Amino acid sequence: MSEPDFKRIVESAPDTIIVFGPDGRYKYVSPAIREATGGLLTPECLVGKHPREIIHNSSDLLRQMESAQTRARETGSDQVLSFDFETPIGTRHFQAVIRPERTCLGQVESFLSIVRDVSEMRRLQEELAAAKAKAEEQTEALKRSNRALERLYQEVEKRVGERTVDLETEIEERRRSEERLRESEELYRGLFESVSEAIFLVRQSDGQILMANETASTMYRYSREELLRLKNTDVSAEPHATKQATHHFRSYIPVRYHRKKDGMVFPVEITASEIEFQGETAHIIAIRDISERMHSEKKLQEGEERYRAVVEDLTEFVSRFTPDGIITFVNSALRRFYDTPTERILGRNLFDLLPPSVSEELRRQLAAATSERSMVSLTHPINSPSGEKRWQEWTNRALFDESGKIIEYQGVGRDITEQRYAQEALARREQEFRNLADNAPDPIVRYNRDVVRTYANAALSRALDTPLPELIGWNLACTPIPDAMRQAYEQAVRDVFDTGKERVFVLQLNPQKGSLHIQYRLTPECSEDGQVESVLAIGRDITDLLRLEQELRQAKETAESASRAKSTFLSNMSHEIRTPLNSIQSVIELLPSLDISGEVASYVRIAEQSASHLLRLINNLLDLSRIESGKTELARKPFEPRHLLQAILRPLAVTAGTKGLDLAVAVADDVPARLMGDELRLGQILMNLVGNAIKYTDTGRISISVKRDAACGREDGRIRLLFSVRDTGIGIHQDRREHLFEGFRHVLDLDRPSSESAGLGLQISTQLVEQMGGRIWVESELGQGSTFCFTVVLEVAEAGTCESKQPARAPQSTAPRPLRILLVEDNLINQMLTSEILRRRGHDVATASGGQEALDALACGRFDVVLMDVNMPGMDGIETTRHIREGRTGDPGVPIVAMTAFGLDEDRERFLQAGMNEHISKPFAMAELEKVLAGISSRARTAAS
Ligand code: ADP
């Protein structure tokens, strides 16, 4: 290579090449220095110069250069030098390699320095170092962060682990809560459906029902679907109030009236709560049907009112007071007692109102009250406001609160003043009775259930001749009673204990001083519950009484047999008298036919009158004897009272007419047309009274009246009739009036026409009137006339039941047909006289003196009628009749008329039962017999036609 080539290369080199001469001066400097120093240094300004001229001596660079050159010289090896150099384009970093240039002799004559601008490299290096440092730092940081990350990772891992567990728990929790939610939802739904209250979910804005439970459907009788179409006002009976309540929420409404689908309105109680539902305000409304409750509340209220009314109306006192005695309630009875209005008594202290000693006792008693023994009773005196001492009995009951503390007392009291006085009086009376019993002349004993005496009085002690201590507390073992009787007596006492019924027992005692009969009345003494506690025996010494009774019984038996003898005697006597009287009457009957006249005829009339009077007397005696012996039984048949009067009075009117007396009858309208009773006996009474009136009246009139007794109404279809018979006759003296109806008293009345007066008529009338449930009396003034009155009780007969006899018919115009008569009579005189009389009346008479004879006669001939005496020796009339009726002889249907001196009713029955058709008593009036025969004759005629 040539020098220019070489030079071109060096000059185009980027590094600055400097060649230092052996003097140290710049020998060569490549142009690159210009660029490298920003134009500061140029080869021109350097070449030939010493660095010292360029670089200050003090400069490090100079020293570094010189020392590097020195070392290069010494070592002969390249020395590297780095330095900074300030240039117009800033501090530049240069690196210079100083290489010694040796001569062929090996001497260092110059130095080649290649200076390279390493600013960029240095920057790069610095950057690299910085980057490296940074990288390291980053590495370190990375490591740190790695470690942190590691820790973080671990932490995260731990956290993740924990979190996983939490998450699982959370999931489980959520699952459970979902489960719970579901369950609770089911529960709520179940509740919603099953509660007894109707539940509605109602939208507040318009009251629309959004939900309703089953109870609501049942309660309102709408289906669920129907309900969901309704608003709450639709089920309300007060829609206006409901609407208001919907807008102004109220959580509780005590009473409101709702309406069911069928229109029925019922009371309800409403509780409500407000909720958000699907973004809107809604009310959950629970509705309870309170009809029942209101009903029972009403009942309760009524009950309470009743209770209050009862308490107010009680005659007992009722009060309430606090434990301090402050009165909080008094009822009207207590107000009345204190004679104070309520406000004056409420708030006062009870203990101040009571007498101090009573207050103290009450406090003491109340202090002892416990919840087990909450009632305390106290009887005490108290002065009434008027100062009167009264006794009250109080029962106070403590009222406790829940903690068992006494909150109040309630007292119920009553005024027992009267009761207390009565008890005191009772105690006094008891003492008196005890004194009485102790001193009673009759034995008094009390037995217990073992028949042991618990009480005995002095009379028993005396009767048994035993001191009282030996009687009381002892049974009857040592009492002197025959064994059998003691057992019976003890049994009687036990019977009273068992049955509770009183018994009478006659006890025979045999004390030493003699036999006693004591009649004990054994009376049960019962406790309040009805149990027989003891038996009280009150005895009476009836020893004397028994003796008297015995005597009386004997006397009575004697009297009764005497009475029976009297009746029999009367009956027999009347029969005996009747028989001859029959003869006498028959004779008298026959006498007129002997054509007598003048004086004889008048004697005959007297005899006839006497005979009929005698007959009446006998009939009356017999009647009275029958009535007195109780043998008369009254008939009970229907009759017409007006007809009866007519029938009775017609014949009497004739008699009255003969004396010139008026006979007037007045029957009041209120007298029934038909009555039921004994017409004949009533007629007998009237006949007697009217007969007497006619008999004892010479001028004036006889008035008969009948009316209803004003003093008596119509009971059980029965009425009382008042009959009166007034005359203007002689009157009756007061002395006689008193005994007029007693009978036999005036038999010996000498002032009277003795032949006419036996005094039996009124006595019979009296007996009959009394038997008919009435009474008879007379009002009379001597010389002024008399009024006989009597009453009878009769039944009112139903219409159409009357069998009253028609007034006696006028005698038949046609004469009776002559009959063929068989007269059966054992008394020959009577037989002879009767048959003669009958014959004289045109009859054909056959006679028989006994039964058999009669049967024989009947066997031989035909008779229209048999007149049969009953009392006959041998076969009597009854037996004979039976034979005839049995068809043993003759016509079994022949009429048979009994003729007997016994006129008793039961006899008549007996005759008719035996088959006889009629009965007439002997002595008979011919007219009576004629009547019977006429009847038979007409029946025979009717049968024949
Ligand atoms: P009798 O008329 O048969 O004597 P009563 O018993 O019928 O018996 O009468 C008793 C007595 O009462 C009569 O005797 C007569 O003295 C008196 N007596 C009865 N009725 C009247 C009368 N209407 N007027 C006056 N005295 C009478």
Image: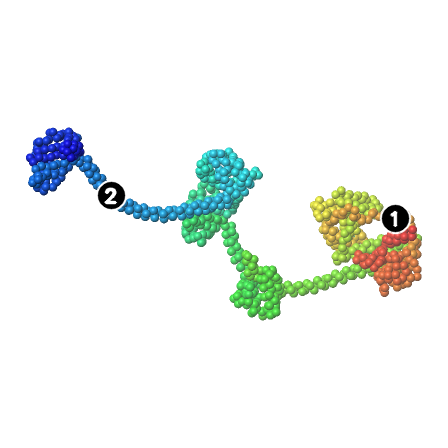
Judge from the rendering whether residue 574 lies leftward or rightward of residue 3; answer left or right: right
Find disc 1 in the rendering and name its residue.
Answer: 811
Mark 1: give few (<14), some (14-19) or many (20+) Cα within 10 Å: few
Q: Identify which residue is drawn at 75% across, 44% down.
A: 671
Q: Secondary structure at mark 1?
A: loop
What's the mark number on residue 410?
none
Measure the C-alpha gap from mark 2 to mark 1.
185 Å
Find disc 2 in the rendering and name its residue.
Answer: 139
Judge from the rendering whether residue 771 lies leftward or rightward of residue 11; answer left or right: right
Q: Identify which residue is drawn at 12% across, 40% down.
A: 78
Please indicate, yes or no, whether residue 23 appears anywhere in the rendered image: yes
Q: Identify which residue is drawn at 80% across, 60% down.
A: 573
Q: Secondary structure at mark 2?
A: helix
> Would you say the beta carbon of the disc 1 residue lies within 8 angstroms of ligand 1?
no
Q: 626 or 174: nearer the eye?
A: 174
Q: 211 or 200: nearer the eye?
A: 211
Amino acid on which disc 2 is placed = Thr
Residue 632 vertical placement versus 542 (above, below) = above
Quadrant of res 726 = top right
In the rendering, at what x and y percent does residue 928 appear? 86, 53
Q: Identify which residue is drawn at 72% across, 63% down.
A: 558
Residue 394 vertical placement versus 504 (above, below) = above
In the rendering, at what x and y percent does residue 553 appear? 69, 63
In the rendering, at what x and y percent does residue 17 appear? 14, 34
